[in-house]
Image (spheres, rainbow, N blue to C red):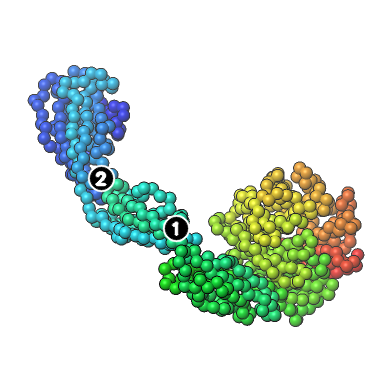
Amino acid sequence: MIQRFFVVALVTFFLNGCGGGGGGGSGTPTGGGTEPPAKGDFTISTDAVNIEGTVGTGVGSVQITGNLANPDSDVFISVDATGSTLITGASVQINGNSGILTLTPNNPAELPVGTHTGSVMVKACRNTSCTSQYSGSPKKINVTYKVNGISYEATPNDIELKMTAHHAFPTPVVVNLTTEKNVGYYGSTWTMLPDEDWLKVDSNWLGTTGTATFSIKKEMPAGTYKRNAELFAFGKAFKKIISVTYTVLPEPFSPSTKEMSFTISSESQLPSLKNNLTINSNLSNELDWTLSSNVDWLDLSVAAGNTTNKTAVQVAVNANYKNLPNGLSTATVMIQDKDKNYEPTPVNISLYVIDTGTPVTDAVANEFPINITSTAIDTAHGKLYLLESDTKKLFRVDIATGITEKYYSFDKTPEKLALSPDNQKLYITILEKNDHDPFWFENQKGYVAILDTETESIQKTLDLTLDPYGIAITPTGKLLISGGSGQWTSLQSYNASTGAKLGTMNDQVFQKQDVFLDKQGNNLYIMDFNTLQKIDVSQSTPSLVKALTINSINLAYPAYPTPDGKYLITRSGELVSTDNLSIGKSIFSSELMRAQSLWFDEINNRVIILVMELNSSAVSVESYNLVDFQRTILKPEGFIDSQSGSYQKPYAIWLYGGKMYYLYPAADGGFKLSSSNL
């Protein structure tokens, strides 16, 4: 004869036959009773169970004994609790013809406070499908479960969130929560009656105390909104109703402008740096107002008035602007109603102090005792720009004389330079942080300063939503920026004049990669240690055209597009077809040669390359025609005394005024500029 314990389909828990067992608890078998066993009779010790528990405290199991007298076949026991949420588990221990059934009650925190009833059905069967039952089967066990509550307080229970239209959201209100028992992992939840998408509630518990923070996440039209929020603790066991009033006041004032901007380069401009402001009422009644500014470089012609008086207020820049750093400074003029019933209405003021540079008085011709991090060569104006990130300075050098004429200072770290194709503007990337961060994924920012090469002044700074690294400018005035942080980052395009973002290619460019733009401004190339990418930048949003995985350990990046756009010349001299990114042989005579700098001489249809031999660090100058790339040596190895092991340092070579110029790291430190006749 086989004795087995099983659960029929659709029950709420599963049991193992002939096993289990458990201790007692706050559940107590009551009532019922047993009859004298008869052959085949199935009996249990009780048909009613009373359970009592308190929220925050566990409840023990309930045990019921059973007996089957003189079974004449196999025995299969099933327990069905599908009709009750009061019991969540069961186990059985069989010893001969008798056994112990152990029921596991639900946790009190999972049930509402109060008294609940349910039942469990137990069957003694001769087969697994239970088509034949022993006499006395089934047995129904009635379950009564009383859940006791504990104190649960929430203060305050009536909150108000008030704001003025088009202003900042109101300060969040914190409701303090307390209970007698440790809330533990149950925490709290909330619902809105009726549901609204303008309210946000964040709850947090630590032991017996917690908080629910009410904040506004959406501005509504002017008016008052009332709702009730239900705060639950221990699942759904306890509920507190919080009355929420959300008031949006109309903006009281309508100034004639909410934005003013001024630009200044000298004190003589002050008489013209002023603007008029007229203040009107948005309400049915007229309002008295006061004006205030948060800076000392602004003058206001009047400090108070009434909206019935349409006399314009004059806002003017004063001489205190001279205490400001070069670049952009901001201020706010606040319009406040006299009785302060409303939030003040701001008028945002911007002042850009043009940096015309600081003269250098102790310069030595052709010598630069600085750590150069980026260069730009402006042959249209005969100037060389040298950037030193460590000191946050940009130096301007006269190419013909080799004299450093002036420098420009920055508050944050400048890193890269790029000259516009027409040589009218120099773009300087500026970092928000001192360096790039591979784990800076969210809320990146940076800047690009614009230097006007005609007026020799920095006149504007653009805000970026990216930590900038690579930079290029198209002939049509599109600014292209690659990311320096966040590992797989973005390539963004901006209007180079206004700073308006045009488009973004996300997550396809690895951090800290230089960008190389063809002369036509249609295609951008990015080359890192194992990938070469061709990106279409002719539209507002850049798009990846082709990516090539590079397997050659000898191929050195970056890659420079030829003027006709047909080839890229890599740093190790390979010619790469821009059509299909196929890699050809190197134009160099040795695989140990690297291009430190190159210059395209379009008049003579050639490229001039400053070449270093890696083993010796010796530098030479070679010329290659752009038809068949035949080589001509212009300067043999050793023609300059460059710094040994300076492979990673910046070099530059260019043609200007009938001469060839080359910038290189000097053997005794710093950098030097040399020239020779062509």
Question: Could you tell me which residue is drawn at 61 percent across and 58 percent down?
Answer: 466
Residue 381: where, in percent of width, then height?
81, 68
Regarding mark 2 in the picture, which secondary structure is present there? Answer: loop
Q: Give the number of marks.
A: 2
Q: Amino acid under label 2?
A: Pro
User: In the displayed image of the protein, which residue is found farthest to the left?
Assistant: 36
In the image, what residue type sits under mark 1? Ala
Left or right of 325: which side holds 209? left
Give coordinates of residue 385: x percent, y percent. Answer: 75, 69
Q: Return the residue nearer the eye: 494 or 394.
A: 494
Pointer 1: what residue? 222
Which quarter of the rendered picture does the N terminus lie within?
top left
How many neighbours does mark 2 have within 10 angstroms: few (below 14), some (14-19), or many (20 or more)? some
User: Which of the numbered marks, if any, corresponds to residue 614?
Assistant: none
| First of labels 2, 1 by sequence position | 2
Question: Relative to 37, is 372 above or below?
Answer: below
Q: Considering depth in this image, is 632 or 320 the residue closer to the camera? A: 320
Q: Residue at x 62, y 77 (%)?
A: 317
Residue 296 seen in this snapshot: yes
Q: Position of residue 326 (x, y in %)?
A: 65, 74
Q: In this orientation, does residue 670 appear?
A: no
Q: Quadrant of residue 314?
A: bottom right
> Which residue does the numbered mark 2 point to in the structure image?
112
Disc nearest the viewer among 2 and 1: 1
- 358 and 190: which is toward the camera: 190
Task: Describe the element under mark 1 as helix, strand or loop.
Answer: loop
For marks 2 and 1, give the CA distance.
40 Å
Crowd class of label 1 (few under 14; some 14 to 19; many from 20; radius 10 Å): some
Which quadrant of the structure image shows residue 170?
A: bottom left
Q: Residue at x 30, y 60 (%)?
A: 155
